[in-house]
Amino acid sequence: MRKNRFSVAAAILATGMLLAGCSSKVAETTQYSGFLQDYSKLQQTETASGHQVLRWISPDFKESNYRGVYITPLVFYPSAKPNARVSQQTLDQIREYASTSLRNAVAKRTTLLPSPSGSRVLVAKVAITAVTAENEDVQFYEVLPVTAVIATTMAASGHRTQDTTLFMEIKLIDQDTGKTVLAVVRKGLGKTVSNEDAPITLAEVKKAIDDLVTDIVNFPKQ
């Protein structure tokens, strides 16, 4: 009986460890890059497509007050460093695809300006802050005592399925005042990969970018 109880306790502990390791739907404070400077006003909210993001909008912001949007070149912040999972070629492809997709999305809802000169201009600054992968969320069947232990072992050995993730931070600045009127921290999920050694390519994170585009196009008019 004592051995039985010990086995159950161990399984419960393993389950707790597994749940603690679940990937969050939004970025954690430790994952902020510093690109936005101020993160204190961000609040979790749901986008038009049902995704969870961290966002702040100035109460004075009204999109119709501006002639259009100028988008500065998309950057990696901090500077991207290729590794065994994400090559330099992949980083270049992700930046190019995200930049083109972003510009097309903004052009569908307002005037895309060629420069920030003049008045009544919104300046959009966008950064990709991480391209990575996290252990996949715990599924219901994994919380059963025996399978919880098995799943924990898989995670420890690097064979657990992972979700690819693309972190982006966005701010809209009123060119006339220099003040930020909208800020977003977004954690986008891409495709799953088989384990922690599997390479991450544009094909894996493309969905995260496409979801962002959908939300920009369908963002409620302010």
Image (cartoon, grey):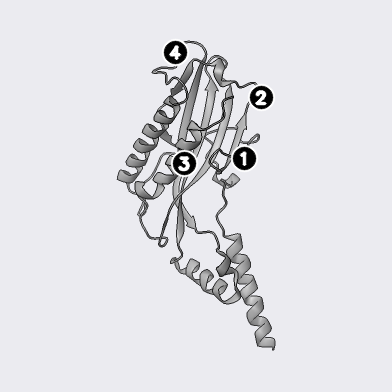
Q: Is residue 48 above or below residue 178?
A: below
Query: What is the distance, in whole Å, between disc 1 and disc 4 at their CAs?
Result: 33 Å
Query: What is the distance, in whole Å, between disc 3 and disc 4 at their CAs?
Result: 30 Å
State the quadrant of the C terminus: top right
User: Mark 2 sits on what residue?
Assistant: 59
Mark 1: secondary structure: strand
User: Mark 3 sits on what residue?
Assistant: 211
User: Mark 4 sits on what residue?
Assistant: 117
Upstream in sequence: badge 1 or badge 3: 1
The residue mark sitting in front, 2 or 4, is 2
The residue mark sitting in front, 1 or 4, is 1
Image quarter of residue 177: top right
Upstream in sequence: badge 3 or badge 4: 4
The residue mark sitting in front, 3 or 2, is 3
Q: Amino acid at mark 1?
A: Thr
Mark 4: secondary structure: loop
x and y percentages locating residue 182 in the rendered image: 57, 28
Q: Amino acid at mark 4?
A: Ser
Upstream in sequence: badge 1 or badge 4: 1
Mark 2: secondary structure: loop
Q: Is residue 68 above or below residue 73?
A: above
Mark 1 neighbour class, 10 Å CA radius: few under 14, some 14 to 19, many 20 or more:
some
Query: What is the distance, in whole Å, between disc 1 and disc 3 at their CAs?
Result: 15 Å
Upstream in sequence: badge 2 or badge 4: 2
Mark 2 neighbour class, 10 Å CA radius: few under 14, some 14 to 19, many 20 or more:
few
**Which label number is shown at residue 45?**
1
Would residue 88 appear left or right of 113 to someone viewing this image?
A: left
